[in-house]
Image (tube, rainbow, N blue to C red):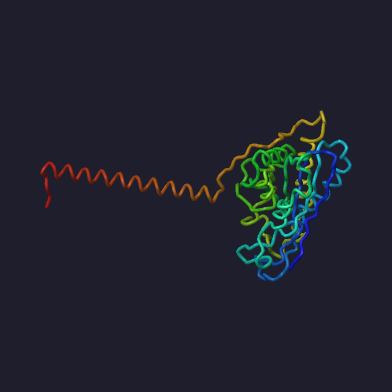
């Protein structure tokens, strides 16, 4: 048996509305995408980077806690990264995101549903690597993720928050919260096919491929999100979009390609059937007119 432990720190418990900021702190037990698959993954980006940003945000927001109109939970998940990928399990028989699933299963033990409510949940996963570029994660609540992207771009992080980001659904720690009914967003990169950061689930996921710039960009974007929605500042040119109850999905590139191929096949099939019908009708007309060819 392996014991696991989520870690929760609450700031401003006197406020009834809750914002959850989350990251996972476990690293993969086996480097299943490496030559030496039995080696441990250092996990500098996946997911120590998210934890580092949360710790710094906790330090910053503690100094501003009297000015913030929300309760903030800093939530660190265990047992996120041990599921099965193409190289095998991180730990035999484990699934993904077991820590967050267990937390949501027991969430009523951590808040009073009669006096407290959740505004949103923001997950930071692989937010410190070089060549940082976030995707449009499709399990995220779109209005919440759109606001984070808008804030990042307004802060000048145009490359990191592209105007037409790659779309892909990712099974991550935010999914359980979204299923519970909490607007949730995952700040995450393309980790499966990314020449700019090819270290996922390998021993090369170490501090040499994590940059201060990426950590700062991720942290400042979330920091500004909190200020926009929960800090009364007349000089702030951007106001938040609470309650983030609008959600939409877009087709990922893979699904879009498959859809296009299916449409093309159906279209060709229809054309072939129409041509065959026209040929049959023409042959029928020839037979009816008595014109035979031998």
Which picture quadrant has residue 231? Answer: top right
For the residue pair 274 and 214, the one nearer the viewer reads as 274
The image shows residue 291 at horizontal and vertical percentages of: 11, 45
Residue at the extreme front: 114
Which picture quadrant has residue 152? Answer: top right
Residue at the image point whose x is 63% and y is 66% from the top: 88
The image shows residue 170 at horizontal and vertical percentages of: 63, 52
The image shows residue 121 at horizontal and vertical percentages of: 72, 45
For the residue pair 32 and 195, the one nearer the viewer reads as 32
Query: How many numbered marks are there?
Result: 0
State which quarter of the image contains the N terminus: bottom right
Which picture quadrant has residue 6? Answer: bottom right
Residue at the image point whose x is 13% and y is 42% from the top: 288
For the residue pair 17 and 277, the one nearer the viewer reads as 17
Up-down relation of residue 13 to residue 84 (above or below): above
For the residue pair 112 and 56, the one nearer the viewer reads as 112
The image shows residue 208 at horizontal and vertical percentages of: 77, 59
């Amino acid at each position: 048996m392996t014991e696991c432990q989520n870690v929760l720190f609450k700031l401003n418990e006197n406020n009834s509305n809750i914002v959850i900021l989350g990251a996972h702190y476990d690293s993969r037990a086996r480097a299943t995408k490496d030559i030496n698959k039995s080696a441990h993954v250092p996990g500098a980006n996946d997911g120590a980077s998210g934890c580092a940003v949360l710790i710094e945000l906790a330090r910053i927001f503690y100094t501003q806690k009297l000015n913030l109109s929300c309760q903030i939970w800093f939530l660190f998940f265990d047992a996120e990264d041990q599921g099965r990928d193409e190289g095998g399990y991180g730990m035999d028989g484990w699934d993904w995101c077991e820590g967050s699933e267990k937390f949501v299963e027991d969430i009523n033990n951590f808040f009073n549903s009669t006096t407290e409510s959740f505004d949103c949940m923001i997950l930071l996963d692989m937010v410190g690597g070089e060549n940082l570029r976030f995707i449009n994660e499709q399990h995220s609540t779109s209005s919440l993720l759109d606001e984070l992207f808008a804030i990042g771009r307004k802060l000048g992080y145009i490359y990191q928050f592209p105007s037409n980001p790659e779309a892909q659904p990712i099974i991550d720690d935010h999914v359980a919260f979204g299923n519970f009914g909490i607007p949730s967003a995952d700040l995450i990169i393309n980790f499966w096919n990314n020449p700019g950061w090819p270290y996922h689930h390998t021993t090369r996921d170490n501090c040499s491929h994590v940059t201060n710039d990426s950590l700062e960009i991720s942290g400042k974007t979330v920091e500004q999100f909190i200020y926009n929605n929960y800090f009364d500042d007349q000089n702030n040119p951007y106001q938040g979009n609470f309650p983030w109850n609008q959600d939409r999905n877009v087709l990922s590139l893979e699904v879009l390609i498959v859809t296009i191929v299916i449409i093309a096949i159906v279209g060709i099939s229809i054309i072939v059937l129409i041509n065959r019908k026209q040929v049959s009708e023409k042959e029928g007309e020839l037979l009816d007119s008595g014109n035979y060819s031998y």
